[in-house]
Amino acid sequence: MCGIVGYIGDKNAAEVLIDGLQRLEYRGYDSAGIAVLADRQLRVMKRKGNVSELRKMVDKKGGMDATIGIGHTRWATHGDPDDANAHPHVNTAGDIAIVHNGIVENHSALRTLLTDKGYVFQSSTDSEVIAHLIDSVWEDNMFLEDAVSKSLCAMSGAYGLCVISSRDPDKIVVARKGSPLVIGVGDGVHVVASDGAPLAGSFSQVEYLHDGELAIITRDGYELKTLETKKNRKKHPEPFEITLQEIEKGGFPHFMLKEIFEQTDVIRDVMRGRVRLDDKDGDTTVRLGGIEDHIDCLKDAKRIIICACGTSWHAALVGEYVLEKFTRVPVEIEYASEFRYRDPVIMKEDVVIVISQSGETADTRAALQLAKERGATVMGVVNAVGSTIARETDFGIYLHAGPEIGVASTKAFTGQVVVLTLLALILGREKSILSEQEIKAHLVALSEIPDKIERILNQDESIQRIAKRYSDARNFLYLGRGYHFPVALEGALKLKEISYIHAEGYPAAEMKHGPIALIDEEMPVVVIGQQSNGDYDKVVSNTEEIRARKGRIIAIVTEGDEDIRRLARDVIFVPNTLPALTPLLSVIPLQLLAYHIAVLRGCSVDRPRNLAKSVTVE
Ligand code: G6P
């Protein structure tokens, strides 16, 4: 949520900042702006709209040949997404510029205080108070970092903050509380950003700023300080491996489509080094390095609670079904935002799993902290390496799905489901619930999933044709049973997110308790059913019920299930697999269907309105 970038080096700062912002656009795209500093002069350029609008403005006005600057792409929280509310914000004298991600909770009290002191506000954002606050506490003998640090003591809320000032011009001061910042460490050049995307291709080492820390970044290096104690923290640069190729569209018109098509490789990557079929002794092995030292704690868990948001919550729901089936341990799924506020019962013997693609979602992070406070062991399933949730959990598993840039999550979902399935297989073996044959059968079936996904991707053109028939629909229903219920929810979410069509996912049998009233000849109903699932006959009966009420049925069924044609207007076939793995296949046509419908409706697929990739506000 909101993307921040800062640059200090020897290149044209405006150009580097705009390139960086473009790569961060999936974090917010309501407005964008930069502030650059040259010859003790600060120039701010900002405007409503996305980064390409800002680029036009900067091309016209020029970037002053500055080699230091900060930039921001905004997802509006306080104040309309207009020019004035775009970041950077400056103090009344115009010599301090800030970009901020997060929320200043006491902004209204601070605004009154600062207005009384004569500061003139230009915007209605909470963030602007920070620029004036820094000015108000800056005494003659102070450096920029002293003033920033002092101002933060008066502020409550969350921040990822970058500040530059013509009063102390050769440095960027950054601070973090609740909103991530990472520094790209180079030779005479440093870039600081909300996540690694702007650093790809230019840096091989990064320093993750910890919560409650401030960094002073110059051309020659950086210094880290703890805000509370003001003491220096030892540097701990880490290798950085995101490549340019991973954050580019690679010939696809949208990141979302690229990421849908990447899923064959993603599943192989998620399993790489973790699953080995038939080693020299004819054994099959499955291991997850991140949990090896904690296997007893997982095995002895009396209960597993999984907390997540959005698509990650849908993966958690698949995880619930698989974990209960394979381990017989009770599993509860919680929306992180509900869990943290409803005073849940959490016991020391519980293992709480938090799932997050970005590793930064504020509610998931708060759920993690609550679980820790109450003494539970907390495990993470995270995609973004080095992210906050990955650091704050007791242990965890990385997806290794590569950066996901399309706001609507696709490859992270399938990656999460694979990780949860591997976890369930490992625990099922440890608890002697699953036989070696069952484990082997699942691992073999998992290894076949990428080729089966490929077969579904090959139907892209026919899915596009189907999409044409429904692109003007106003509502959609998605129905599935068992493992396909979470897929129905995920299919509906994809459609809502990117095409703005109202869609609901429902357990197929629950249809009779309400949604059936909505069905008429106008209503497209996606029915997901696979013959290998024991409840298939029931799904067919539900489909008959929809047909009897003239619903427009799109069936997602197993290859060879020609019978369904008598009921469905459109049929998309997916290969057969073991029941627990069916979500990995049935979700693919739903991602493609949502994608094509959104494109046909002229929607902004990678940057859907009002959404952001990483939701760092509660
Ligand atoms: C946002 C994104 C979704 C994502 C959800 C949870 O709403 O737009 O795509 O599923 O956050 O994010 P996380 O990074 O925690 O998985």
Image (cartoon, rainbow, N blue to C red):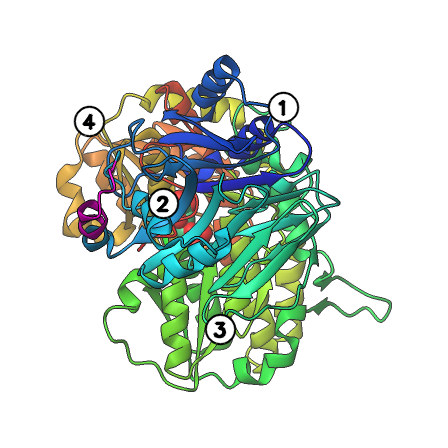
Say what amino acid the circle numbered 3 marks. Answer: Thr
Rounded to the nearest angstrom, the CA distance separating label 1 from label 3 is 50 Å
At x 70% / y 39%, what residue is drawn?
202
Rounded to the nearest angstrom, the CA distance separating label 3 from label 4 is 67 Å
Q: Which residue is mark 1?
A: 251
At x 61% / y 61%, what residue is drawn?
442
Rounded to the nearest angstrom, the CA distance separating label 1 from label 4 is 39 Å
For marks 2 and 3 on the same chain, the one whose residue lies earlier in the sequence: 2
Q: What residue range appears in magenta?
A: 111-121
Residue 117 within the magenta-colored segment of the rendering: yes
The label on residue 490 is: none
Q: Secondary structure at mark 4?
A: loop
Q: Which residue is mark 4?
A: 521
Comparing labels 3 and 4, the label whose residue is closer to the camera:
3
For marks 3 and 4 on the same chain, the one whose residue lies earlier in the sequence: 3
| CB within 8 Å, label 3 to label 4 | no
For marks 1 and 2 on the same chain, the one whose residue lies earlier in the sequence: 2
Q: Which residue is mark 2?
A: 131
Say what amino acid the circle numbered 2 marks. Answer: Ala
Comparing labels 1 and 4, the label whose residue is closer to the camera:
1
Say what amino acid the circle numbered 4 marks. Answer: Glu
Q: Which residue is mark 3?
A: 229
Comparing labels 1 and 3, the label whose residue is closer to the camera:
3
Instruction: Determine crowd level at label 4: few under 14, some 14-19, many 20+ residues with C-alpha closer than 10 A.
Output: few
| Image location of residue 353, percent across then percent down | 46, 69
